[in-house]
Amino acid sequence: MFAGPRADYIIEQVKGAEIWDVKNTGSMKPSFDETDWLLAVQTPWDQLKVGDIIIYERKNGEYIVHRIWAISSGGSMILTKGDSNATPDHEHVTKSMYRGRVIGQIKRPIEVDKDGQI
């Protein structure tokens, strides 16, 4: 049995926050892993800074959660990198792709089925 704060209660305490699941890629380990829920808010684009973890949507509809590695001099593009990736991502994030800034994480219990599979 898991004892801990309910996610809906936590969300109610942070105005405008959303919970996001982590995709199982390992690109942000050890910061978080595929069993975590991420708490994200809409930080204005011009207030983002290098080191922030953001969520953005690729043109194919896939959501990515990576850390800001660089911001263009005019602030119109952001370059991100997964913490465990050797190089920055190949695409530049624009304001229209940006979905939120991660402000926290919720560790959730690992669910195991009757065959012992996670």
Image: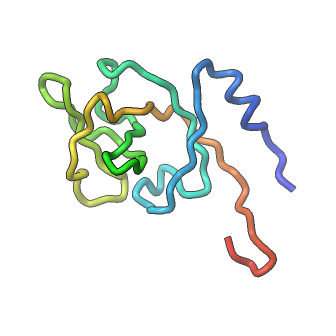
Please provide percent x and percent y for residue 41. 51, 26
Please provide percent x and percent y for residue 80. 28, 44
Name the quadrant containing residue 35.
bottom right
In the drawing, does residue 94 fall left or right of residue 62?
A: left
Q: Residue furthest bottom?
A: 115
Image quadrant where one finds the N terminus: bottom right
Residue at 80% x, 42% y is 4
In the drawing, does residue 43 fall left or right of residue 21?
A: left
Residue at 29% x, 18% y is 46
Image quadrant where one finds the C terminus: bottom right
Residue at 69% x, 76% y is 117
For the image, the number of numbered tags is 0
User: Residue 101, relative to residue 118: is it above or below?
Assistant: above
Residue at 69% x, 21% y is 13
Please provide percent x and percent y for residue 103. 51, 31
Please provide percent x and percent y for residue 19. 60, 37
In the drawing, does residue 51 fall left or right of residue 39?
A: left
Q: Give whichever of 22, 59 is nearer the camera.
A: 59
Q: Residue furthest front?
A: 60
Q: Residue furthest left?
A: 73
The colour scheme is rainbow
Q: Give whichever of 96, 116 is nearer the camera.
A: 96
